[in-house]
Image (spheres, helix red, strand yellow):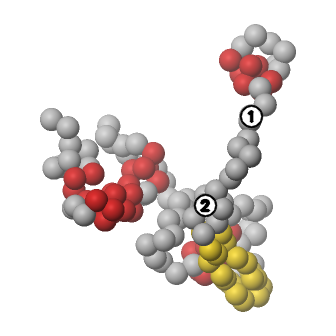
Amino acid sequence: LRASDTVTGRHLDDRAVLKEEVRKPTGALEIRGATAHNLQDVDVDIPLGVLTVITGVAGSGKSSLVHGSIPAGENVISVDQSPIKGSRRSNPATYTGLLEPIRKAFAKANGVKPALFSANSEGACP
């Protein structure tokens, strides 16, 4: 497949070039003594200011760690396993539930209302 002259073959044969300079974490969210379901006194530091992914085999406690140990806050956005809902105006941000925190962040940074960052209201193009 890698040697075939297809789009898939070309992508499999290409090596991604990684950045030499990567974003540095701006701190860490400390979790100490997480104990729920399969978690038993788990300590972990989750980097902040960078994309962070929690992975593991089924039943290892990923959801318990994230949803049971991380306090809800404006600096943490969690993409969970909720079923995807959509309409013709849906996009990845609406699918994942990230649109609202994104709208709020842009509004705060620009000193305006979140409604200006919506495809469905004041901010929509005519």
Q: Which mark is residue 114?
A: none
Residue annotated with mark 2: 50
Q: Residue furthest front?
A: 21
Q: Looking at the picture, does residue 73 appear above or below residue 10?
A: below
Say which quarter of the image contains residue 106: bottom left
Query: What percent of the width, then of the height, locates residue 32?
Result: 70, 87
Q: Residue at x 39, y 50 (%)?
A: 94
Q: Looking at the picture, does residue 21 appear above or below residue 113?
A: above
Q: Is residue 108 left or right of residue 92?
A: left
Q: Looking at the picture, does residue 78 appear above or below residue 117?
A: below
Q: Amino acid at mark 1?
A: Ala
Q: Secondary structure at mark 1?
A: loop
Q: Residue at x 72, y 25 (%)?
A: 11
Q: CA distance from mark 1 to mark 2?
A: 20 Å
**Does the image show residue 10?**
yes
Say which quarter of the image contains residue 14: top right
Q: Amino acid at mark 2?
A: Val
The C terminus - image quarter: top left
Q: Is residue 8 left or right of residue 50?
A: right
Query: What percent of the width, then of the height, locates residue 124?
Result: 20, 43
Q: Which comes before the other along the chain, label 1 or label 2?
A: 1
The answer to which of 24 and 115 lies nearer the viewer is 24
The answer to which of 103 and 67 lies nearer the viewer is 103
The answer to which of 28 and 66 lies nearer the viewer is 28
Q: Secondary structure at mark 2?
A: loop
Query: What percent of the width, then of the height, locates residue 15?
Result: 78, 31
Say which quarter of the image contains residue 41: bottom right
Residue annotated with mark 1: 16
How many neighbours does mark 1 have within 10 angstroms: few (below 14), some (14-19), or many (20 or more)? few
Q: Is residue 22 left or right of residue 118?
A: right
